[in-house]
């Protein structure tokens, strides 16, 4: 076997299908479509400034964010890869205001595909790892066009979730509900090869990721947690922590899956009209499924992410995930602390991230 005895993505999916005698192969085919789009995006990203312009286009998406040429191209690659072969009944993307209706000449399938075609694209110009995130749900009425409300399913209804990361190597990380597995793109063969079977997030960690520039807007529970970590071995935790921040959800997730940690982009008061920064349907839900299947936890701070019932396609949400022990601690702080009660246990009113009055 030219892959050194390791199964390819296709072989892995066939193995998974054999465990479900009633499976039709439609899900396998859809995952293959998505993996092809990710290969094409990887190539576009690798070209950097030699490919599409890396600046903004002047267009603003439904999120209020300026689109880059690669955002638009990546979105098209996802659509063209998945729309034609009768496996999806509709699609939702970060880059599209409304759900995508398939062209009339294509058959409708039994799945819904939701995706962020190029997460972290603001990092393209500085050559930091970016990625694509996707989620698969069952269509309410297979064979017919999906309605917008058909997509509004809690994350517990996902049948598949994954991401591709475009870094020093290109990897596809996938779950079908029986563990989280990672495949590395073998560039000479052009094949996804299983490189990490059954990833596990360590229960304990001494590493956390948060955008500290937003500290003045954090809820008391988050301020308390970060203060205690920053106090290190001389503080109440009694150990030193490292702080990370990449500003790429895929890159943060990949680090946590590979070596542990906790990621926080919590609800805050920076914009009271937004209940969070990240999108529930095609960012928080698929990442949460991957993390939970690897033994970690994912929460808003108060509610398990996968149990949140969506109310809109582009709903935002506070998002905390990673090593189970640390996420549980943060949930406990949210449960314990009244909203206005936080006083820094380290420096009183001069707490590292505590506000003064």
Image: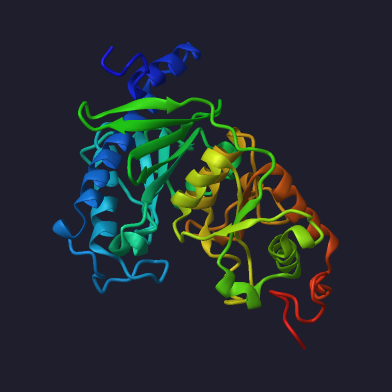
Residue extending farthest bottom: 357
Q: Which of 61 and 255 is in front in this view?
A: 255
Q: In this view, does 149 lie to the left or right of 44?
A: right
Query: 71 or 216: which is nearer to us?
Result: 216
Give the residue at x 55% y 45%: 256
Can you see residue 86?
no
Residue drawn at (64%, 35%), measured in percent from left and top?
A: 295
Residue placed most toward the observer, 214 or 92: 214
Percent of width and height locating residue 160: 48, 34
Asked which colour scheme the image uses, the reply is rainbow
Question: How far across and how far down the image is residue 100, in percent?
Answer: 33, 51
Picture coordinates of residue 244, whole percent (x, y) = 54, 58
Point out the residue furthest to the left here: 50
Q: Quadrant of the N terminus?
A: top left
Q: Is residue 258 left or right of residue 26?
A: right
Residue drawn at (33%, 40%), measured in percent from left and top? 169
Name the quadrant of the C terminus.
bottom right
Q: Is 80 located above or below residue 118 in the figure?
A: above
Image position of 14 (left or right of 202): left
**Which image quadrant is residue 35 in?**
top left
* Side (left or right) of 203 relative to 285: right
- Give the percent coordinates (x, y) of residue 70: 25, 57
The residue lying at 73 percent from left, 44 percent from top is 325
Q: Is residue 286 visible?
A: yes
């Amino acid at each position: 076997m030219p892959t050194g005895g390791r199964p390819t993505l296709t072989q892995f999916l066939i193995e998974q299908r054999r465990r479900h005698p009633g499976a039709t192969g439609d899900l396998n085919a859809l995952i293959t479509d998505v993996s092809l789009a990710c290969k094409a995006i990887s190539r576009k990203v690798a070209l950097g400034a030699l490919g599409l312009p890396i600046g903004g286009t002047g267009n603003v998406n439904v999120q209020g964010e300026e689109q880059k040429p690669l955002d638009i191209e990546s979105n098209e690659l996802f659509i063209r890869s998945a729309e034609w072969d009768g496996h999806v009944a509709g699609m939702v993307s970060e880059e599209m205001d409304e759900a995508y209706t398939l062209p009339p000449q294509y058959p409708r399938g039994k799945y819904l595909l939701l995706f962020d075609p190029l997460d972290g694209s603001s990092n393209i110009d500085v050559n930091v790892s970016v990625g694509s995130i996707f989620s698969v749900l069952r269509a309410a009425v297979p064979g017919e066009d999906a309605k917008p409300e058909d997509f509004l399913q809690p994350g517990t209804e996902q049948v598949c979730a994954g991401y591709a990361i475009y870094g020093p190597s290109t990897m596809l990380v996938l779950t079908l509900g029986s563990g989280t597995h990672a495949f590395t793109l073998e560039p000479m063969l052009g094949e996804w090869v299983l490189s990490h079977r059954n990833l596990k997030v360590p229960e304990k960690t001494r590493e956390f990721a948060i955008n500290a520039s937003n500290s003045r807007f954090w809820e008391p529970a988050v301020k308390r947690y970060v203060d205690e970590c920053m106090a290190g071995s001389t503080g109440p935790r009694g150990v030193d922590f490292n702080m990370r921040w990449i500003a790429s959800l895929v890159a943060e997730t990949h680090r946590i899956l590979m070596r542990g940690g906790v990621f926080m982009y919590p609800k805050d008061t920076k914009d009271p009209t937004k209940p969070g920064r990240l999108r529930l349907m095609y960012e928080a839900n698929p990442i949460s499924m991957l993390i939970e299947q690897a033994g970690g936890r994912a929460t808003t701070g108060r509610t398990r992410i996968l149990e949140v019932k969506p109310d809109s396609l582009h709903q935002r949400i506070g998002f905390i995930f990673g090593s189970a022990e640390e996420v549980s601690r943060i949930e406990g702080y949210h449960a314990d602390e009244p909203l206005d009660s936080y006083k820094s246990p380290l420096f009183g009113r001069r707490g590292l991230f505590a506000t003064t009055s």
